[in-house]
Image (cartoon, helix red, strand yellow):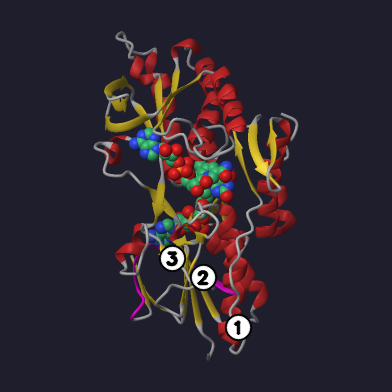
Amino acid sequence: MNKPHIVLLGAGYGGMMTAVNLQKQLGVNEANITLVNKNDYHYQSTWLHEVAAGTIHHDRARIAIKDVIKTNRITILQDTVVEIKPDEKKVKLENAVLDYDILVVGLGFEAATFGIPGLEENAFMIGNIDSSRLLREHLEYHFAQYNNERDKKQARLNIVVGGGGFTGIEFVGELANRVPELCEEYDINKAQVRIINVEGAPTVLPGFDPQLVEYAMNSLESRGVEFVLGAMLKECKPDSIVYEKDGKMVEVPTMTTVWAAGVKANGIVENSGFETNRGKIEVRKDMRTPEYDDVFVIGDCALIMNPETGRPFPPTAQIAIQQSYTVAKNIKALVRGGAELETFEPNILGTVASLGHNDAIGVVMGDHKIFGWSATAMKKIIDNRYLLKLGGIGLLMKKGKFNFFY
Ligand code: FAD
Ligand code: NAD
């Protein structure tokens, strides 16, 4: 191939790490590389629940792309992808059209709302920096407003979180730490505030280790979180939500509904006419689409089946990062020609979920259970390890989490 144009769509975990790996692996004159992203920063989606609750500032979770990517090697293009035209080898952006020889689709996830009435209009999502900041401001506004009304509205202090998967649980953990601070700040009795987690399955974190689930629920309940299990959220109105439990409809007054009950791949993938399975592209072993030899897919837009369970691997940053090494190697092989493409093999190192900044649960190294301080420390080590891989010691020192003792 004669100095091909490699285009990377999305500066998430998959896109950023592919870019970093390519800048290490390809020589200056081997390819032109363009990284397209909506913003001029990369954000760590895995920290967004903290941004949304207000327990960290949003600048902690975002990293200027130019601080990590060598701009003399990779062109950073701040623009929004509108459509991919794989038959024409083109990408339509809001402000330009790009031609490519090799494409990497890493456009990440968006909320799956399953057509539930009122969610799109009235619920808050923890989807990116802007939506998480909006939620933080909204929470603060209602606490501030509460004492300034003659007719005090309990709906301002009821916070409902739909979905008790990892996102829902990590978010209520942060909220449980943030609410006492907000109460102090706005002269509100903490007993008046309700954090209600509504989960459709009979347990939160369905499928996760039951002992650790019990630990998590105890930890969160002791900090005021209420769980409503076996309850499906059915409707979201501006000042209430409706869930169904045991065949009965229950309405809870709330001006803050947070939808954390599932994600899907970025809709651009399906709308661009790729062959999809559950909205994602079921990639070949080498991370390319089934029908295009020049299109790789990475992260939450890619679907990989787990042969042991017969179900897809859950979409995680862990997998997106691992995939970036295979994708970069395979792109190098295509550019240089001759070499066989590598097969991607996920290596699941474990799952660790925070329950606020001072508690966590996890299963690591096969089936080793951790909780409390050791899990909290492990979570921070995982976060720091990523920063080290992405931007070396400088980035780690700038953005890392070193508060291991609380
Ligand atoms: P993303 O990280 O979603 O990045 C996509 C990028 O594409 C973004 O930069 C976005 O701005 C850009 N983009 C989107 N649309 C466009 C467009 N049209 N044009 C241009 N650019 C666009 N996983 C774990 O492994 N461990 C965890 O602890 C963990 N915690 C999580 C906590 C939360 C609160 C959430 C929400 C998720 C968590 N996950 C975790 C899952 C993990 O965040 C995702 O699997 C991961 O972010 C997927 O990475 P990605 O590279 O596919 O895309
Ligand atoms: P999820 O799909 O894992 O969980 C969604 C939850 O919402 C499920 O428990 C489901 O039963 C429930 N639900 C669905 N519809 C509902 C309804 N109408 N009413 C009430 N409950 C309903 O989604 P998620 O938690 O956003 O996680 C998305 C991905 O990100 C997953 O792959 C997860 O593993 C990953 N993630 C990982 C971590 C971590 O490793 N610490 C943290 C957050 C997210």
View extreme (left): residue = 117
Q: What's under tag 3, amino acid-wise?
A: Glu
Q: Is residue 46 visible?
A: no
Q: Is residue 203 magenta?
A: no
- The residue pinned by badge 1 equals 340
- Amino acid type at circle 2 is Met
Answer whether residue 304 is visible to the viewer in this image: yes
Quadrant where the C terminus lies?
top right
Dot 1 amino acid type: Glu
In front of the other: 303 or 35: 303
| Left or right position of 194 against 393 | left
Answer with mark 1 or mark 3, whichever residue precedes in sequence. Answer: 3
> Is 393 placed above or below 166 here?
below
Nearer the N terminus, badge 1 or badge 2? Answer: 2
Q: How many marks?
A: 3
Which stretch is magenta? 71-87
Disc 1 and disc 2: Cα gap in Å? Answer: 13 Å
Closer to the camera in the image, 231 or 19: 231
Residue 114 is situated, as x and y percent measured from the top left of the image, at 30, 44
Residue in the picture at 51% in, 84% down: 4
Q: Residue at x 59, y 37 (%)?
A: 209
Instruction: State yes or no: discs 1 and 3 in contact (Cβ < 8 Å).
Output: no
Where residue 278 appears, as percent x and y from the top left, is 37, 57
Q: Horizontal placement of 261 versus 381: left or right?
A: left
Magenta span contains residue 73: yes
Looking at the image, residue 291 sits to the left or right of residue 243; the answer is: right
Q: Secondary structure at mark 2?
A: loop
Location of mark 3 (residue): 282
Q: Look at the numbered disc 1 and give the secondary structure of its residue.
A: loop
Q: Which residue is mark 2?
A: 287
Give how far across and how far down residue 250 sits, in percent: 29, 21
Tell me, yes or no, whether the two marked residues, 1 and 2, touch with CB atoms within 8 Å: no
